[in-house]
């Protein structure tokens, strides 16, 4: 008990020290001065920016221009499609790898036999999950953009790669924490390996898989705008353009559409939870 | 029956998304396959030299520093907003206050950190603080929401004992709610720290330094082996933090 507390306490202390060092670094090494933050110039910038967002001084701010609204609406639809495509790719990839990504299947404790390739396959899949998960979607987007043409595809694939690692980890842990009873009873009634998997393991884990998939889809919706900057698809493309042209009233319109999308995803996932429970 | 509808709905959405891809002129660049090959090959042969590793370490330090500085603000924001939007202090009559703060947290969370960063750069210029604040807001939103849920999940018996013993609201908070929720709060915060490193790495997009910036530069030069080296360093750092927060979580639960 005492040792437990020590490790945690030392960790907390370490984190606090890093906090302190970080601020020291930001202030001393980077030479940030807080007084400059609220300088005349910055206040002027902020005021201009906010005025621009509100469309002050424009004849026809974008959020009152039917043309712009139509354009943003179609981009919003594109963005939604990008998110669905990416979670679909991530889920299919996860389902293809998750069986051997679970420790208890690859070492043969859950099903009856194990193949010679199970262990190396398990390590390879786990490593793949770690690498894909640790690299943010945006960096994947930068790499993917070399291969695919601009549009929703690069964004969808970048999001899919990152989220594949996340759902892969979560879902393989679901299989690892499974109740052994039902699977074992199938075993004793003489089911084959694949039968045990299809009739024993999958029915138990699929609902949990779905929960994780829907949760990640919600997170993906939030990131679509950002990968769109690079992959040049959906709302992100327009956001970047408007930002570079200082077309701030368009930004307001895009942000409104984006927030609508986020809250809609929130509602859909709640609906899904109610339906599936 | 409900499950069937759900399945049909999901299948329909996926098919629709596949159909919405513009396939008129192929989805890959003309040299896409060649590119893919060279990217994959350089994955196996990352560039490793003393100079590169030094740059990587420097950049990593910058990334970690911004992540932690941002998180330190998020924790304060999360605690204050989380307590206000939980039932620990504002009860029955004052529920609307909590609801309002919950909505504010939702708004902070809904906007991605990079977009916050863009806004800060547009208003206060390209200073490291833009990045730090940009991380702090959405992370504060997430932490606040989770903290308030954790405070609401605190077992009611010990808390109501304190209440009937005549403790003030603040005393009940500090001696009842917070100690009971602290272990789950700490382990969640550690998990978010790991996410913050990842988010901090992508702040290079608005022009801030760090490991993301190095990856970006290497990709600009089409120097994939160098880019992979930096990516692997990032993977190592994130995985190390992940392992640390996992071992803390194991001890707390």
Image: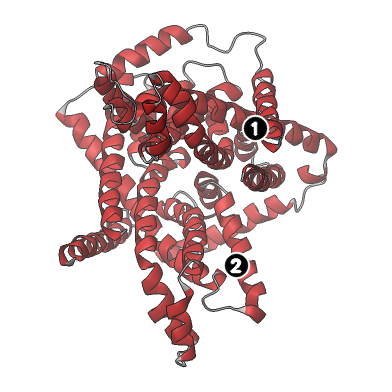
Residue A170: give x, y in percent of width and height.
Answer: 41, 38
Q: Is B142 positioned to the left or the right of A16 in the image?
A: right
Chain at numbered mark 1:
A
Residue positioned 28% across, 53% down in the render: B250
Q: Mark 2 points at which residue?
A: B101
Q: Which of A191 and B29 is in front in this view?
A: A191
The correct choice, above or below, for A168 with respect to B77 in the image is: above
**SS for tag 2?**
helix
Give the quadrant of the C terminus of chain B.
Answer: bottom left
Q: Nearer the viewer, residue B161 or B209?
A: B161
Q: Is B52 positioned to the left or the right of B199 in the image?
A: left
Q: Is residue B63 in view?
A: yes
Q: Which of A117 and B45 is in front in this view?
A: A117
Residue positioned 51% across, 63% down in the render: B149
Residue neighbourhood size for the residue with mark 2, other residues' Cα within 10 Å, grouped as few (<14), some (14–19), many (≥20): some
- The residue furthest right is A66
Give residue A45's quadrant in the image: bottom right
| Marks 2/1: CA–CA distance | 29 Å
The correct choice, above or below, for B246 with respect to A230 in the image is: below
Q: Name the residue under label 1.
A: A79
Residue A112: give x, y in percent of width and height.
Answer: 31, 24
Residue A149: give x, y in percent of width and height.
Answer: 56, 16
Residue neighbourhood size for the residue with mark 1, other residues' Cα within 10 Å, grouped as few (<14), some (14–19), many (≥20): many
């Amino acid at each position: 008990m005492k040792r437990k507390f020590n490790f945690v306490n030392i960790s907390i202390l370490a984190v606090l020290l890093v906090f302190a060092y970080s601020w020291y670094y930001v202030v001393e090494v980077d030479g940030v001065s807080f007084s400059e933050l609220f300088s005349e110039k910055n206040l002027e910038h902020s005021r201009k920016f906010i005025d621009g967002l509100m469309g002050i001084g424009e004849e026809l701010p974008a959020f009152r221009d039917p043309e712009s609204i139509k354009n943003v609406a179609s981009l919003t639809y594109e963005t939604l499609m990008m998110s669905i495509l990416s979670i679909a790719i991530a889920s299919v990839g996860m389902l293809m790898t998750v069986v051997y990504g679970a420790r208890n299947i690859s070492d043969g404790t859950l099903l009856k036999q194990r193949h010679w390739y199970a262990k190396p396959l398990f390590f390879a899949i786990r490593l793949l999950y770690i690498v894909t998960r640790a690299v943010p979607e945006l960096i994947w987007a930068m790499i993917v953009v070399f291969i695919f043409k601009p549009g929703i595809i690069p964004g969808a694939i970048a999001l899919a790669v990152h989220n594949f690692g996340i759902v892969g980890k979560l879902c393989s842990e679901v299989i690892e924490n499974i109740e052994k009873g039902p699977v074992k009873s199938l075993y004793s009634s003489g089911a084959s390996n694949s039968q045990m998997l299809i009739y024993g393991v999958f029915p138990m884990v699929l609902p949990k898989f779905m929960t994780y998939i829907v949760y990640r889809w919600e997170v993906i919706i939030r990131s679509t705008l950002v990968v769109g900057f690079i992959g040049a698809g959906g709302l992100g493309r327009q956001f970047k353009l408007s930002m570079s042209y200082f077309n701030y009233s368009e930004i307001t319109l895009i942000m409104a559409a984006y927030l609508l999308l986020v809250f809609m995803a929130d509602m859909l996932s709640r609906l899904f939870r109610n339906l599936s429970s | 029956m409900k499950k069937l509808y759900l399945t049909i709905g999901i299948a329909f959405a996926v098919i629709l998304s596949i159909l919405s891809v513009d396939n008129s002129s192929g989805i890959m660049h003309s040299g896409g396959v060649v590119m893919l090959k060279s990217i994959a090959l350089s994955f196996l042969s990352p560039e490793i030299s003393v100079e590169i590793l030094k740059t990587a370490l420097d950049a990593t330090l910058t990334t970690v520093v911004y992540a932690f500085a941002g998180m330190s603000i998020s924790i304060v924001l999360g605690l204050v907003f989380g307590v206000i939007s939980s039932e620990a202090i504002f009860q029955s009559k004052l529920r609307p206050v909590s609801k309002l703060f919950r909505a504010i947290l939702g708004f902070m969370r809904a906007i991605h950190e990079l977009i916050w960063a863009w806004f800060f750069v547009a208003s206060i210029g390209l200073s490291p603080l833009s990045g730090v604040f940009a991380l702090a807001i959405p992370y504060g939103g997430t932490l606040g929401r989770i903290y308030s849920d954790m405070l609401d999940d605190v077992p009611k018996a010990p808390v109501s004992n304190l209440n009937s013993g005549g403790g003030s609201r603040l005393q009940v908070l500090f001696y009842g709610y917070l100690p009971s929720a602290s272990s789950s709060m700490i382990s969640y915060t550690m998990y978010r720290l790991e996410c913050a490193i990842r988010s901090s790495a992508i702040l290079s997009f608005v022009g801030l330094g760090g490991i993301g910036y190095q990856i970006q530069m290497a990709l600009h030069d089409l120097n994939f082996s160098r880019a992979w080296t930096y990516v692997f360093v990032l993977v190592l750092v994130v995985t190390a933090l992940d392992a640390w927060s996992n071992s803390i979580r194991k001890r707390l639960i």
